Image: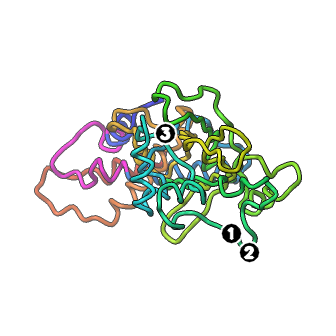
Amino acid sequence: MATLNEIAYNIKNLAYNGDTNEEENIGIRQIKFWIHYHRAKIIKELAREGKGIPQECLQRYVFDEDEHYQYQNNSDFFTYASGLTNYQSRDLVASSKRTLDLANAGGAGIYTSEFYGNDYYPQDRGGQADEMGQIILILPEILNIDGYGVKNLKLNRRKATIAGAGHNVNHIDIPITDKTISVRHGYSRFGKKSITSYIENSASQQLLVIRNLQSVYRQSNQQDDIGEPILYRATANLLLSNPTDYKQWNNDDDMYPFPDYLVSDLTREVMQEMQIALNTQPDMVTDGYDTTRAQVQQRAQR
C-alpha cells in the first residue's frame, strides 16, 4: 500500500504536470480531504455492488480507558478501576451492579434494562445476576456499511493481581449483531451465557456495547465469595471514515488503508474534484501564470 503523502503528492504532480508555482490554487491539505472523502465513497460503492470491502481498508484498533464510556461518564468508577493493582491504561472493567457497588459509584454508566423494560440479567443465574455487566466503548467515526464498521472484535482478560504480561493470550471472539438480536440472545435458553455486542448510535456518538460479561472473579459458588474485578482488553478491526483518526496514526507517511489496485480510481475522482474547484476559482493574476485549470481538465478526463 502507498502512504497518504505518496497518494496526495502524486495527485498534485499529475494535476500540475510536476510544475509547482506560487499560483497553485489547491493546497495539499485540501487534496488529502478529498482523498478521505472519495475513499469512503468508493468503499460504499463496492458494498452497494456486492463486491465486498477490501481487508486493506480496515485498521486494527486497540481500545483503552479513553474510549471506555463508563470511565468517562462516572469518575468514581474510573477512580476505582484505575486504582486496582497493576492497572494499565488498556484495562477495562465491566460495569455491573457488583462493580459499581465496589466502587461506590452509583448506577451511572450501566443500562439496567433494555427497551422492552426487562432486566438485562435475569435472576435465574443463581444469584449472580448482579455480577454480569457490560463494557461500552466510544467508537471513532466509522463507515458502518453492511456491518463492516467493526469486525473481528476480541477480548482477553486477567486478574488485577497479575501483572500486565499475565493477560490471557486466548482471545474471546465476540460476535457483533443487531441490538434486538443481542438483547434477545440473553433470554434464550442457550444464549444467556454468551457474550454479544452491538453498535448503538446515540445523538453525538457511536458506541460499541459488549454485554453479558462476568465482571468479577468468583472463588466459589457461595453468594458472598467474591474475588477481584476482571480486567478486560479489547481490540477490533475498524473501517474508519477518516483513517488518520486512527490513534496509532503517526503521520501521513504511514501506509494509507486502501488497496493499490483502487488508487487509480481514487486519483481520478480527486482530480475531477480539483477540476470542479478550479472552474469556480478565478486566477487573480501575478502572473506566474495559472495554466493549472487546463492541465487538470486534460488529466482528469483521461
x%, y% of residue 212? Answer: 69, 52
Amino acid at the residue labelled 2: Gly
Left or right: residue 116 versus residue 88 is right
Identify the residue under disc 3: 62
Left or right: residue 282 versus residue 92 is left
Identify the residue under disc 1: 113
x%, y% of residue 106? Answer: 50, 66
Between discs 2 and 3, the one toward the N terminus: 3
- The answer for how far apart the CA atoms under marks 2 and 1 are is 6 Å
Identify the residue under disc 2: 117
Circle 2 or circle 3, nearest the eye: 2
Query: Tag count in the figure?
Result: 3
Left or right: residue 44 versus residue 260 is right
Magenta residues? Answer: 13-32
Q: Is residue 226 magenta?
A: no
Residue 196 vertical position relative to residue 1 in the rendered view, above or below:
below
Residue at 78%, 48% in the rendered image: 193
Residue sitting farthest toward the bottom: 117
Q: Residues within 10 Å of mark 1 (few under 14, many from 20)?
A: few
Q: Residues within 10 Å of mark 3 (few under 14, many from 20)?
A: some
Q: Nearer the viewer, residue 299 or 134?
A: 134
Residue 279: quadrant of the picture: bottom left
Between discs 3 and 1, the one toward the N terminus: 3
Residue 73: quadrant of the picture: bottom left
Amino acid at the residue labelled 3: Val
Q: Secondary structure at mark 1?
A: loop
Q: Residues within 10 Å of mark 2 (few under 14, many from 20)?
A: few
